Amino acid sequence: MMHRRALLILMALLVLVMPVMAQDATPEPVMLEPWVCPEGFEGQTLNVYNWSTYVAEDTIPNFEEACGVRVEYSVFGSNEEMLARLSQGNPGFDIIVPTGYMVETMAGRDLLSPLTAENIPNMANIVEVLLNPVYDPGNVYSVPYQWGTQGVGYNITTVGEEITTWEQVFNYDGPVAWIDDPRAMFAIALSILGFDPNSTNPDEITAARDFLVENGDNVVAIAADDGQALLQRGDVDITVEYSGDIFQVAVECECEDYQYALPAPSAQVWVDNLAIPSGAPNQPLAEAFIDYILDAQVGADISNYIAFATPNQAAIDAELILPEHLDNEIVYPNEEFIASSFSILALPDAEQLYSDAWDEVKILLGR
């Protein structure tokens, strides 16, 4: 049975999707004032640690110009990679972008700095149901950045059929890539086996490990958040990936080859967040950056460019989100999917079990 906290997350996202998909197509446009940087930051530096391909082309340059600052931008490939790096001590990052369960994990290890809410007035732009999340009650450490799903991208021309189940992925006679995300891959296996995707039962985790090993013969790569590049190059025909990454590939191709599926019996819905790691050299500038990202126009520009779902109600209300995104179930999944999906939860007592089991999977598969 799905953990109650995961169900609460999914219910909140269901409430978010319903008004987005049902909104009036022709309301009066809203004229917005451009974001203005607080004074006193000229000449300073902000260090951002984010997922790759996760901002618009002008997001960082516009912030640098508005505040008269310089931004150093680094990327990571998984929550676990980010956690491992910061667990050794903050090397100088001011902004990080953890997924919901990782916010809770890092807060529990004193790896996050509490936010100063008065420095982030644009928190008022966030859709209400995504505030006060179960992984960060009161938004003490984080604010929502983007949300979406994790399923499979595939080349329907080479696969030869529409993918509707995980069984097709695991049984496919051709090259497949998994994502280097132990909790995501184990949740898929646990779901297929009829277990809780957030199981803490050692026997169930072992069964999921065995399932992945036994069904991994077609895996040619375990990718660090770049499975879409493998798909686009033709290195794989199917990849476990995030919705927006596949949507971007499909748009760039301007073809019908690339499809995205949320296979049965279940797939993941997630929320990524802006947070400030403990020991951040410049927390005031980091909070200004968070406020900038939560500006309706800035947030819309990001979501429109990277094709993930916005948590910014002000951007939706002002009709700043592209209609072709709002109407596309790759970007904004339908109610039926959200009702049947799962979210990854922080499981500190089982964290090592998952880590060890994932290492065993990769060793046994030679990946």
Image: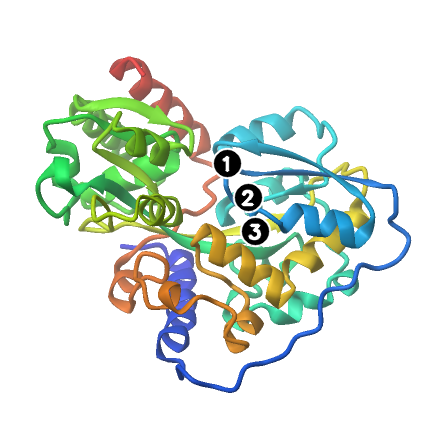
Gap in angstroms between the C-alphas marked 3 and 1? 12 Å
Q: Quadrant of residue 340?
A: bottom left
Instruction: Say which label, 1 or 2, has the lower sequence index.
Output: 1
Residue at 63% from the left image edge and 61% from the top image edge? 294
* Crowdedness near tag 3: few (<14), some (14–19) or many (≥20) residues, C-alpha within 10 Å: some
Q: Residue furthest right?
A: 40
- Whether tag 3 and tag 2 are in contact, CB under 8 A, the answer is yes
Residue with the mark numbered 3: 273
SS at badge 2: loop
Instruction: Give the distance between the C-alpha atoms of the residues marked 1 and 2, in whole angstroms.
Output: 6 Å
The x, y position of residue 208, in whole percent, is 24, 32
Circles 1 and 2: CB atoms closer than 8 Å: yes
Q: Position of residue 287 (x, y in %)?
A: 75, 53
Q: Tag 1 or tag 3, which sits nearer the N-term?
A: 1
Label 2 sits on what residue type?
A: Pro
The circle on residue 98 is 2
Q: Amino acid at mark 3?
A: Asn
- Which secondary structure, mark 3? strand
Measured Cα–Cα span from mark 3 to mark 2: 6 Å
Quarter of the N terminus within the rendering: bottom left
Residue 114 at least partly seen: no
The residue tagged 1 is 79
Left or right relative to 284: residue 359:
left
Residue occupying image coordinates x 89% and y 57%: 39
**In the rendered image, which quarter is residue 158 located in?**
top left
The answer to whether any part of residue 9 appears in the image is yes
